[in-house]
Amino acid sequence: MTELNLKKLFFVFACIMSSVFITVAQDWANLNRFREENAKLGPARTCDDRVVFMGNSITEGWINLVPEFFADRSYINRGISGQTTPQMLIRFRQDVLNLWPKVVVILAGTNDIAGNTGPSTLEMIEDNIHSMAELAKAHGIQVVLCSVLPAYDYPWRTGLEPAPRIVELNKRLNKYAGTHGVVYCDFFQAMADERNGLPEELSGDGVHPNKAGYTIMAPIVENAIARALLMWEEFK
């Protein structure tokens, strides 16, 4: 291959990679992920107890590992692996508000602590979660605010020692819920081991629940949803 052809080949490759990068960058919050599914959903009826689960890979993994939990219920899973709270906030309108559920279950924050989209303080995480909760409340949607699941370390970014930050963030989320008419869903206390991590019997990597982990989580979140639905009836 001549030097000229090599230069042409490199130029074409560079153009393709630039196009891919631009496409990904333009959909930083992954707004296209559920666009078609959202369009196919019929309008919510007042008799439907529609609930949207907003989250990251822990939420997405729930429907992948335990699809029967979402079957034959008005539960809509809108979890996207790897996402942080600023990404969720950007897509909150199309993936939650525009679906008009009675309740939204927000499970978020661990990827922020892991630094998936850059460094985040606890205050930054709080701000994004508070904004999602306030948007929901402003649209008549009751909020279930979940604790961040325990994690002693992140396998994709080791050495961050996330456990103390998760404990502190959960304290703040619990306090916010208690003072803002929001239901707090405490997974942490039921799942944490002596290191404030996720034990092996509940997770393969110390971060993401397995079926046994989701089995513990299911009745906890169902109880929280039931409480939120009662609040929706009171304030409708």
Image: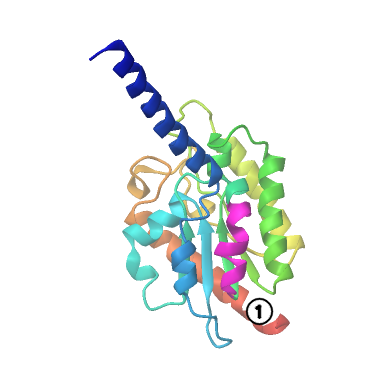
Left or right, 127 with respect to 89, comes to right
Residue sitting at 54 percent across and 80 percent down?
A: 43
The picture places residue 8, in percent across and down from the top left corner, at 35, 22
The picture places residue 124, in percent across and down from the top left corner, at 69, 42
The answer to whether residue 158 shows anywhere in this view is yes
In this view, the residue farthest toward the bottom is 47
Q: Which residue occupies the foreground of this view, 186 or 231?
A: 231
Which of the image's four quarters has the N terminus?
A: top left
Q: Which residue is mark 1?
A: 232
Above or below: residue 211 compared with residue 204: below
Q: Which residue occupies the foreground of this view, 88 or 193?
A: 88
Q: Which residue occupies the foreground of this view, 60 or 163?
A: 60
Q: Residue 143 occupies which quadrant of the picture?
A: bottom right
In this view, the residue farthest toward the right is 179
The answer to whether residue 196 shows anywhere in this view is no
| Color theme of the render | rainbow
User: Counting other residues with Cα less than 10 Å from the Cα at mark 1, is it few (<14), some (14-19), or many (20 or more)?
Assistant: some
Span colored in magenta: 88-101
Above or below: residue 125 compared with residue 154: below
Looking at numbered disc 1 in the image, what kind of residue is underneath it?
A: Trp
The picture places residue 232, in percent across and down from the top left corner, at 65, 79
In this view, the residue farthest toward the left is 1
Above or below: residue 235 compared with residue 198: below
